[in-house]
């Protein structure tokens, strides 16, 4: 069993190669480019950690880890196209650098490459791994569609936002852990617990993300405070405020969207505080974090084997950015 | 063994259902929409025919056939986005009807659904089928990228155009036949012959497509004669003309692209005739058709079992539209 940093390095060492042929250069350079903007590789590490709960990680772990990382990057390329985002992790997005059509195709070919790695998994574990992967892939698309649908809706309920966030961001974390468990030889019950651990941890992470955008220390997050407020984004906080703020405060929120006053962030934060959205979000985060931990508790392996995953959960929650 | 019409109906009967859940309606309605614009279902029929060469077709055939048809439709959605095409088979394209972003995602989710059907193939045949499918999927993306690259190049060589056309249109036909052979229990040699049969037949079909656009009877093709010429498309005919027409004719071709004279189609057709591009294309079509048939000849099953595939090849070549 290895800690996050070790596994992240171990994965990176093998993953940091060109994953595509040289020919049809335009296409494959675009695909390789986004991989060179290295992320935190959280999902591949989750595959390894879940595998190591049950058995030493071998080639299956790398292939599954590479697969989920490629899928994640495919979804980033297409999301950036849809959002017309100019930057990704401070670098030009693929469509900015290589043009819309090549970016679209680079995403497609990366999706196919994700399946290429996945299909290298041993025959014993392949059908189950691919079933989880397929389901997850569809759900991530559903989440992105819901996110776009919500942009055009004046208000979104808590349940709907939770569903969208779960699909868009949590299920891939959950699926990575579940596939890791599968290739580690875990039984069905343990696979499910790891899935639920990841899903609820992902939700807690997102609640925190929304919280930090509003109440985080800009010096630590490295982002402008209230970025979501300025962009009129529906977040856990805003959805809570819409439900629990006074009618006058709700009318003020409507007005701020129209008029974009200079002190918008400050005024909205005050409304959040008045309806205790900040306290509520902190409790909500704790709630999902605790559900996640309960599922990890329930995984039927010795406590000592769980240390790395417990640490990962703490790591994700302790971040201030 | 069944003929094209029977298999096409047999497939359609099972395939003509909603392939997606109801929720996330926007996304799945868009995906289902393109399937309702029914095509000729040539690729699914190829899966069935290749399977029936070796053994009666069962569930594996349907799952593989649905998979290649979904993949084909995924590629149509994304190609139409890239080409900014308003119409597909006389109907609104997905992005025209549902918007760019939903169309992009509908393509993605259809790609995942293709893998969902594919992964239902029996464990014995799954690894080989998925390997063929992955390779084919990547090649189709490569073909589309080359096609876009060629648009920005003043001239393209015959070999490069052949490669692009093979990747963009022939390998999926070839892969469908090969997967059909795999799930029919064929040996490696027979699988390869069916792949080569499909690949070369696909090339012959494309040569004919280019030929008919220029020299076909508009009343029969239902298309404007010389559509490719008007759009300045690089076709087998144009590439031959660029190589074999006189310098004066080549200069005229350059001028026509700049000036778009009213009699452009007529003038270009004359250049094609002068350098015998029409005769050459007819021979080229025959050449690839004969290579295809040679591979079908070499498949090691009794001649009587090959009747339906021979008929399919004739059918594809006899069309006038």
Image: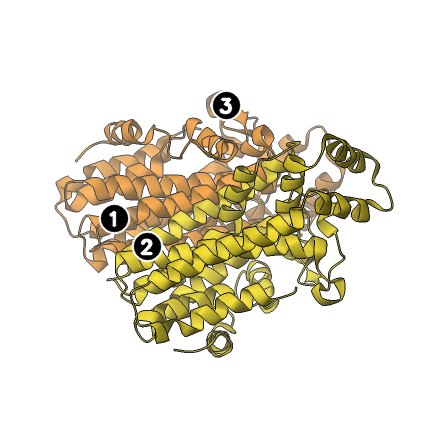
Chain colours: A yellow, B orange
Q: Is residue B279 visible?
A: no
Estimate the x, y position of residue B208 in percent, counting from the top left.
44, 38
Q: Mark 2 = which residue?
A: B130
Whether residues under marks 1 and 2 lie with C-beta atoms below 8 angstroms apart, the answer is yes
Q: Nearer the viewer, residue A13 or B194?
A: A13
Q: Is residue A312 visible?
A: yes
CA distance separating discs 3 and 2: 38 Å
Estimate the x, y position of residue A296 in percent, counting from the top left.
39, 62
Q: Regarding mark 2 in the picture, which secondary structure is present there? A: helix
Q: Which mark is residue B222?
A: 3
Label 2 is found on which chain of the structure? B
* Residue at the right extreme, as displayed: A262
The quadrant in which the N terminus of chain A is found is bottom left
Residue at position x 23%, y 44% in the image: B60
Quarter of the rendering containing residue B48:
top left
Do discs 1 and 2 belong to a common subunit?
A: yes
Q: Regarding mark 1 in the picture, which secondary structure is present there? A: loop
Dot 1: within a 10 Å radius of its alpha carbon, few (fewer than 14), some, or many (20 or more) residues?
Answer: many
Q: Which mark is residue B121?
A: 1
Residue at position x 52%, y 70% in the image: A18
Dot 2: within a 10 Å radius of its alpha carbon, few (fewer than 14), some, or many (20 or more) residues?
Answer: many
Estimate the x, y position of residue B243 in percent, counting from the top left.
59, 52
The quadrant in which the C terminus of chain A is found is bottom right
């Amino acid at each position: 069993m290895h800690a996050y940093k070790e596994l992240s390095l171990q994965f990176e060492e093998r993953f940091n190669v060109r994953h595509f042929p040289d020919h049809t250069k335009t296409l494959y350079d675009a695909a390789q480019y986004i991989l060179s903007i290295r992320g935190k590789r959280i999902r591949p590490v989750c595959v390894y950690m879940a595998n190591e709960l049950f058995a030493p990680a071998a080639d299956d772990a790398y292939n599954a880890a590479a697969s989920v990382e490629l899928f994640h990057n495919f979804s980033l390329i297409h999301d950036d196209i849809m959002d017309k985002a100019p930057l990704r992790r401070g670098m030009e997005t693929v469509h900015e650098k290589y043009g819309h059509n090549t970016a679209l195709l680079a995403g497609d070919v990366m999706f196919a490459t994700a399946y290429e790695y996945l299909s290298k998994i041993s025959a014993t574990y392949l059908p189950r791994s691919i079933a989880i992967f397929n389901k997850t892939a569809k759900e991530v698309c559903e989440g992105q569609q819901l996110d776009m649908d919500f942009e055009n809706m004046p208000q979104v309920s808590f349940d709907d936002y939770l569903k969208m966030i779960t699909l868009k961001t949590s299920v891939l974390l959950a699926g990575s852990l579940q596939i890791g468990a599968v290739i580690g030889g875990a039984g069905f019950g343990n696979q499910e617990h790891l899935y639920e651990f990841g899903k609820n941890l992902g939700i807690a992470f997102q609640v925190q993300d929304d919280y930090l955008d509003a109440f985080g220390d800009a010096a630590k997050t490295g982002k402008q405070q209230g970025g979501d407020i300025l962009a009129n984004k529906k977040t856990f906080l805003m959805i809570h405020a819409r439900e629990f703020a006074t009618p006058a405060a709700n009318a003020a929120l409507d007005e701020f969207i129209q008029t974009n006053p200079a002190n918008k962030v400050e005024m909205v934060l005050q409304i959040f505080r008045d309806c205790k959205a900040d306290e509520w979000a902190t409790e909500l985060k704790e709630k999902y974090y605790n559900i996640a931990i309960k599922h990890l508790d329930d995984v039927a392996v010795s406590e000592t084997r769980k240390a790395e995953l417990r640490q990962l959960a703490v790591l994700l929650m302790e971040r201030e950015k």
